[in-house]
Image (cartoon, grey):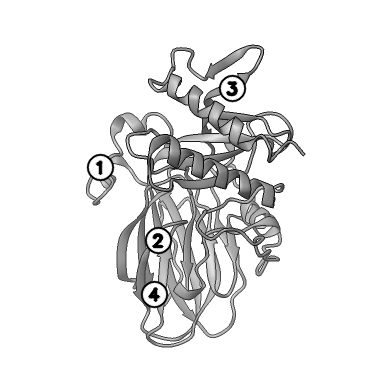
Amino acid sequence: MAKLLMACGIGGNRDAIICISHPSKYIGSVYGEAFDVGLAQKFIWYPEFVIYLPPGRSGSYWAEIYVSDTLELQPETIRAIAVPFTVASDWETLLVSNKFDEGSLFCLGKQGNYQLLFEARYLAVNEADKLAGFDWYTSELSNTSQTSAPELIRFTFVPTVEFSEPQILRAEAGFNPPQNLSLNPPYEEPPLHRTDIPLILSSHVTPQTFEFVSICERALQEFYHAERPRAHIHRGSAFGEPEDPMWVDFSNIPSVHPFSISIKRDGSLTLGEVARGEFGQIDRIIWQLKHASEEGFIWEAYHPSLIRRDAEELQQLLLLLKERARNLFSS
């Protein structure tokens, strides 16, 4: 019989991953081939941590941790994956978390090898409203898209003597896993970067890019008379050449709704806001403001009626940024 060790809410954003790890080995992002492997088989496995890419898009999970003598799937489970996991000591703490989330610690109480069973399904409204932090999920939302529902993620640790091979035990429609599942995919260390900027690295992030971010930070501090804003560089492209432009999200500016600044390889700048897909790629442009010396300012929006109240202020900011970055991209 399965014994419940812990239950907790995880996430509440659109990172759409969940991770079981040894806390000292937890990482925020996986790059390159390892991410491609995980995208195909919906999990990324290393001895120190296992990252899962659950079925839904909300990135909001109710996680339950169990130990059991047997591996048994729940009838409602739509996806089930079993992988090996090793606990080094009886009182070693483990972490269940999602990207950029501190998560929650738990302890199995017994060292050894385990089969770690991951099960996922969508929560119904009458289930979610009984859980702390899930009152945002209403009947109206449930009628839009099931993949936007919060998910119940159930982890079950089953003791085993031998190292168990990974298995896809149940797959929902549309998930067609590869025949051969991968453990320990090649892990690429991200290039050296400033530790105070959380990054989803693009293929053309360069020292010049970091200098551009610094220029923007200083300009925003001066323009808004604010403390240092929080910058986040994103990969992906909404138009143009692959990964061009690059969008840098800026937030933490008092009384200013977050916005982004884009930079192309030719040095042209745009202010705007983008909507992102399940894995962080740019889905569409919500609005953007450009400046061409001959045509003046150009405002484009996903909804034609969308004009920010601070549009004139943004025009002044865009001119300031162009002036500050002119020498950087003139060579």
- Which residue is more in the foreground, 232 or 84? 232
Q: The disc labelled 1 sits on which kind of residue? A: Asp
User: What's the CA distance linking mark 2 and mark 4?
Assistant: 12 Å
User: What's the CA distance linking mark 4 and mark 1?
Assistant: 31 Å
Mark 4 near mark 1, Cβ–Cβ under 8 Å?
no
Other-residue count near label 1 (Cα within 10 Å), few / some / many at <14 / 14–19 / ≥20:
few
Q: Earlier in the sequence, mark 3 or mark 2?
A: 2
Q: Residue at x 54, y 17 (%)?
A: 299
Check residue 154 in the rendering and tell me which mark sits there, or answer none: 2
Q: Earlier in the sequence, mark 4 or mark 1?
A: 4
Check residue 68 in the rendering and tell me which mark sits there, or answer none: 4
User: What's the CA distance linking mark 1 and mark 2?
Assistant: 20 Å
User: What's the CA distance linking mark 3 and mark 2?
Assistant: 47 Å
Residue topped by disc 3: 290
Q: Position of residue 175 (x, y in %)?
A: 60, 47
Q: Earlier in the sequence, mark 1 or mark 3?
A: 1
Q: The disc labelled 3 sits on which kind of residue? A: Lys
